[in-house]
Amino acid sequence: MSTVNEAERLALAWIEGWIRGTPDEIPLAARFTHSSPFGVVAGREKYLEWVKPLAAKNVASLKILRTVGSETEAAIWFEMTTPQGTIPCCDWVQVKNGEIVAVNSFYDATDLR
């Protein structure tokens, strides 16, 4: 029997929020930080303002494949389908007090620029 811990639950909420098209409802901390091949963005509002147009342009769909984690951090492996094809991705999600405080995204962004 497997159980989903807090960080895995929030990692799933992270990707599922994007799948549903409701990124504003993802439980991101006010001081949320995101790093990716595009650089680092600090602050929840700044991140959402920056990423929503980028996602609308590049992301056709997301498919969750696997999560693994502890109470404070999790990795979520997923596929991102773009107009240029499907890209394997992995996000390292860090959580505290029921919120996502940081996400480090790993994927090949060569065709997304």
Image: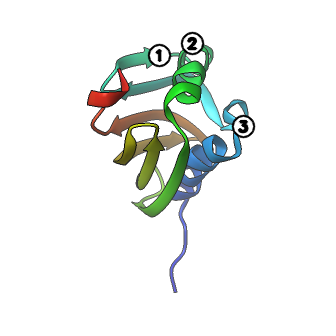
Mark seen at residue 73: none
The answer to whether residue 58 is visible is: yes
Name which residue lies at 47% across and 16% down: 42
- The mark closer to the camera, 2 or 3, is 3
Verify CB contact (< 8 Å) between mark 2 and mark 1: yes
The amino acid pointed to by label 2 is Lys
Q: Residues within 10 Å of mark 1 (few under 14, many from 20)?
A: some
- The mark closer to the camera, 2 or 1, is 2
Q: Secondary structure at mark 3?
A: loop
- Sequence-wise, which precedes: disc 1 or disc 3? 3
Real-space Cα separation, disc 2 to disc 1, in angstroms: 7 Å
The answer to whether residue 73 is visible is: no
Q: Is residue 28 left or right of residue 76?
A: right
Real-space Cα separation, disc 2 to disc 3, in angstroms: 16 Å
Mark seen at residue 42: 1
Label 2: which residue? 46
The quarter of the image holding the C terminus is top left
- The mark closer to the camera, 1 or 3, is 3
Q: Position of residue 96 (x, y in %)?
A: 53, 40
Verify CB contact (< 8 Å) between mark 1 and mark 3: no
Examine the rendered structure and indicate whether residue 93 appears above or below residue 52.
below
Label 3: which residue? 22
